[in-house]
Amino acid sequence: MCAYDCVRAGQAVLIVYQGDLEHTSSFYAQGGIAAAWLDSDSTAQHMTDTMMAGDGLCDPRVVQDFCDHAPAFIQRLIDLGVPFDQDAGGYRLTKEGAHEHSRIFHVKDHTGTSIIQTLGHHLKDHPLVQWENHALQGVLQSSDQSRVIGVRFNDQNYLAPNTVLATGGFSNIFSRSTNPRPNIGEGIALAYAVGAPVGDLEFIQFHPTVFCTDSHPPLLISEALRGEGAFLVNKNNERFMKKYHELEDLAPRDVVSRAMIQESGPKLNIVPLMTSIQYRFPTIYHALQARGFSQHDIEIPVQPLVHYTLGGIVAKPNGQTEKPGLFAIGECSLTGFHGANRLASNSLLEAGIMGQRCASFLIQHAKSHHHNDTSHHLTSMDPLASEDLIFLGHLTNQALGVIRSSNELTSAIDSLGGHPQKDHPMFLFLMAILHSALHRKESRGGHYRSDFPDTHANARHSLVAHSHELLHVDAI
């Protein structure tokens, strides 16, 4: 959305992406995008649901801002051509976890794909857009390191008055996740390395219903299935969520994930969807068939798996970071919208509105910053070897799971500090995550400590600057 608005205003845009455009978190998004659309709903209720899921760490001003503007953003997507599902009564909205009302706009079970394809169609052959398929090798700063002035990729430097990171989260630093392979947090790590503060890194969301086999990638089973009638059972075919939360199967994701850890052999019962699943959720249905399921199977073995990272580069709703010239939008950012645990289908909303706001700022200040000095400072990011990625994956699995403890976190910090690559930006970034988790001695949202199970009365954010000093602050 940021690139689209910029080129419409006559601004040239360089888009650097790694691998395949189809392998991005936005493209993978199944469920949909939330907005209070029906007369029975309200933006105030959307805000209330977001704040409840965020468990004390949402910024009320940001939440109100994004929820108030959600319907207008949906209308803009409709005007651009996103074919949200409809029935005789209008748009067919569904309900997901922790939502009080049906407010999820969707395109069957491939909403993100449809949005990205629609925007991509408008940008694909645009004369002001330059596409480059390369891994990012580093960030360029002015010689005094006061401002970001571009990036390095393909062994070349590219100068720009503004650099926008939309690099996703760091879920795939774990050995298995629901995320695309490139999502290991390199964008956040580079921002941290050039001095942009990062925060709330300890809050990591696990999606409760993921089907895992050895022969296929993990298959996320959208929360929308539970919103339309599917339910969780244990090995004795007993529904168990009522024991853990009043919203039962539609409780916030952190609650459902911890409940599933406590239960034995959790499965998703899809009997209520047997006549509709292949039409309403065709992507999931065909993926299940590829994994050996037939149309007569009624239960899917599921488990929690890393899905979304709540922390990131501290940014305003327009993407501005504290590092001049550097912007961050979407999952790589931290705005205060999601808090300690994201409400389902709020992520595409945040990314889209931030993209619009960021473009507006860049257009308004298009001639404010021009770097004519040929000298610069490069903060580089060498690719990690496969054995280093395996090491990091094992370490994060052990220390940063659904339930954590001081012993596991301390052991991971010691292992990381003794590794030969300890000064690599990714290792330094992971050290910041581990210290944030160790020093949050409470349980809140996507951070649960078995040794500190209670939640403090005062919710405070974790903030880490490039000095590696960890602070706990009331607001970001």
Image (cartoon, rainbow, N blue to C red):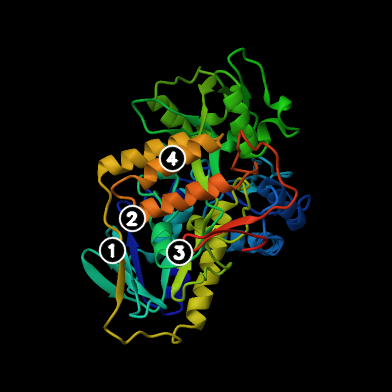
Identify residue type, mark 4.
Ala
Amino acid at the residue labelled 2: Asp
Q: Which mark is residue 423?
A: 2
Measured as percent of width and height from the top left, residue 18 is found at 31, 55
Whether label 1 touches label 4, CB < 8 Å: no
The residues tagged by marks 4 and 3 sit, at their Cα atoms, a distance apart of: 21 Å
Three-letter code, disc 1: Glu
Mark 3 = which residue? 466
Q: Earlier in the sequence, mark 2 or mark 1?
A: 1
In this rendering, is residue 157 above or below 32? below
- Which residue is at the far top? 236
**Residue 101: horizontal and vertical position, in percent?**
73, 45
Q: Which residue is mark 1?
A: 132
Q: Is residue 444 left or right of residue 380?
A: right
As drawn, the label of residue 412 is 4
Outermost left residue:
155
Mark 3 and mark 2 in contact? Answer it, CB < 8 Å.
Answer: no
* Picture residue at 54% right of the left edge, 50% below the top: 436
Q: Is mark 4 in CB contact (under 8 Å) with mark 3?
A: no
Secondary structure of residue under mark 1: strand
